[in-house]
Amino acid sequence: MSDTSSLSELARFVGQSALASEDAVVRRQAVNAMVTRFNPGLKRRGVGDLLGVVMALSARTRRMLMPHVEIELDVFDPAGSRAVKVTLPRRN
């Protein structure tokens, strides 16, 4: 098969996906079907899951309320020039 025939086939391609439909209901059904296929084990959450979320959020809240810490790191090679350069984003 030559490159020209492949390009000709591509030029004749007509998309038939339900996602390209003009009807919003058909598009929504297609998206819902994809989500169901990606996550077939969708289940209700239990009390343990809820407790885990609450604990994680409370820990995150405590960390956000703590004062910011600055660390200075000086590392030199045997010749006396800087050996390490670390750049981190600054938080306001």
Image: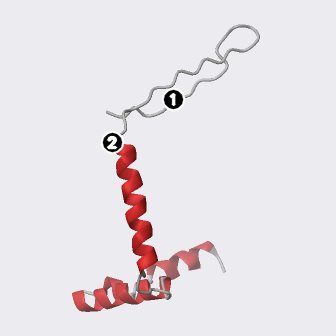
Q: CA distance from mark 2 to mark 1?
A: 24 Å
Residue 18 visible in the current orientation: yes
* Local SS, label 2: helix
* Residue 14 against residue 64 in the figure, above or below: below
> Which is nearer the eye, 1 or 33?
33
**84 left or right of 12 in image:** right
The mark that comes first in sequence, 2 or 1, is: 2
Quarter of the rendering containing residue 86: top right
Specify the amino acid type for callout 1. Answer: Thr
Pointer 1: what residue?
Answer: 87
> Residue 46: x, y in percent?
43, 82
Q: Position of residue 50 (x, y in %)?
A: 39, 73
**What amino acid type should be assigned to the residue bearing mark 2?**
Leu
Point 64% across, 15% down: residue: 82
Q: Residues within 10 Å of mark 1 (few under 14, many from 20)?
A: few
Give above or below for 57 relative to 64. Answer: below
Residue occupying the point 40% across, 84% down: 15
According to the image, what is the colour scheme of the structure? secondary structure
Query: How far from the left and from the top, in percent, is residue 3?
Result: 61, 73
In the rendered image, the vertical position of residue 54 relative to residue 68, given as above or below: below
Most extreme residue toward the right, as rendered? 78
Helix, strand or loop at mark 1: loop
Residues packed near mark 2 inside 10 Å, few (<14), some (14 to 19) or many (20 plus)? few
User: Disc 2 marks which residue?
Assistant: 65
Is disc 2 in contact with disc 1, using a CB cutoff of under 8 Å?
no
24 vs 10, nearest the viewer: 24
Query: Looking at the figure, which quarter contains the C terminus?
Result: top left
The residue at 66%/80% (across/down) is 1
Q: In this picture, is 56 found above or below 1?
A: above
